[in-house]
Image (tube, rainbow, N blue to C red):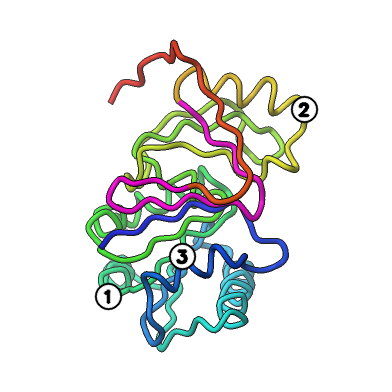
């Protein structure tokens, strides 16, 4: 079963609702894969992989095998890790850099075909869309509205960390993006679960949409 979970962030550790969702589809002793956002930023990747694993551990969720995907391994090895993973974490960070690495390493077909739990956080959640509509955000290295093919796991677009977004970003940048697709603005601790095209939203969110959305060419 393919389970896609889109998250914003968990500043105080995983919520009970999030843990319940994971335990519904995962039994301990499986394989965990952490996909970096910057494949060359090894120290930062290792730091956040450890933080993520500690959050799982504190909630009684364990893994027998843990693998990190960045440029320290080959494309072939990365695909092998994905093909046997039970839980895959697509990390936060630089959204545009991450999708470039995923395409360069040719990891998208493996992610699309894997039947497991795939969790995106922040940038990782954004990139899980089939067609990504990414709002301009100067403070997050996104100089202009960007529209591109994403990983292709879900049909929705999200804007993470809505609770810390500036008024200008919300009223101008996200509004601009919403002219091209519906945007689900997620607050930290909120997340969206999609299983077999059924979507459930947990926590606080805001839906930005324009009933006269322009068509995005495929």
Q: Residue at x 58, y 74 (%)?
A: 46
Look at mark 1 in the image and give the residue it sits on: 84
Q: Nearer the viewer, mark 2 or mark 1?
A: 2
Query: Could you tell me which residue is drawn at 73 percent across and 42 percent down?
Result: 163
- The range drawn in magenta is 182-200
Which element carries disc 3, helix, strand or loop?
helix
Give the label, 3 or 1, closer to the camera. Answer: 3
Q: Compared to 102, does 42 lie above or below? A: below
Crowding at mark 1 (Cα within 10 Å: few <14, some 14-19, many 20+): some
Q: Main secondary structure of the magenta part?
A: strand
* Residue of label 3: 21
Q: Secondary structure at mark 2?
A: helix
Structural distance between the alpha carbons of marks 3 and 1: 21 Å
Is residue 100 shown in magenta? no
Residue 133 at x, y = what percent?
47, 31
Q: Quadrant of residue 173?
A: top right
Closer to the camera, 91 or 211?
A: 211
Q: Quadrant of residue 86?
A: bottom left
Q: Earlier in the sequence, mark 3 or mark 2?
A: 3
For the C terminus, the image quarter is: top left
Nearer mark to the viewer, of 3 and 2: 3
Left or right side of 104 for 126: right
Vertically, is 159 above or below 123? Answer: above
The residue that label 2 is drawn on is: 167
């Amino acid at each position: 079963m393919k389970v896609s979970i889109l998250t914003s962030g968990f500043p105080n550790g995983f919520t009970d609702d999030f843990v319940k969702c994971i335990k519904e589809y995962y039994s301990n002793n499986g394989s965990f894969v952490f996909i970096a956002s910057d494949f060359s930023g090894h120290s930062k990747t290792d730091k956040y992989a450890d933080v993520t694993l500690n959050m799982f551990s504190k909630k009684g969720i364990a893994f027998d095998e843990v693998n990190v995907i960045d440029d320290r391994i080959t494309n072939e090895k990365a695909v092998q890790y994905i093909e046997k993973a039970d839980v895959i974490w697509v990390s936060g960070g630089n959204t545009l850099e991450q999708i470039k690495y995923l395409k360069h390493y040719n990891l998208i077909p493996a992610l699309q075909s894997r039947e497991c739990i795939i969790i995106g956080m922040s940038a990782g959640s954004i990139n899980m869309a089939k067609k990504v509509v990414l709002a301009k955000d100067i403070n997050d290295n996104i100089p202009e509205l960007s529209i591109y093919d994403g990983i292709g796991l879900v049909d929705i677009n999200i804007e993470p960390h809505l609770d810390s977004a500036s008024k200008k970003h919300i009223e101008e940048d996200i509004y601009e993006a919403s002219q091209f697709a519906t945007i689900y603005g997620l607050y930290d601790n909120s997340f969206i679960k999609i299983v077999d095209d059924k979507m459930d939203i947990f926590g606080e969110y805001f839906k930005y949409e324009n009933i006269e959305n322009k068509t995005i060419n495929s």
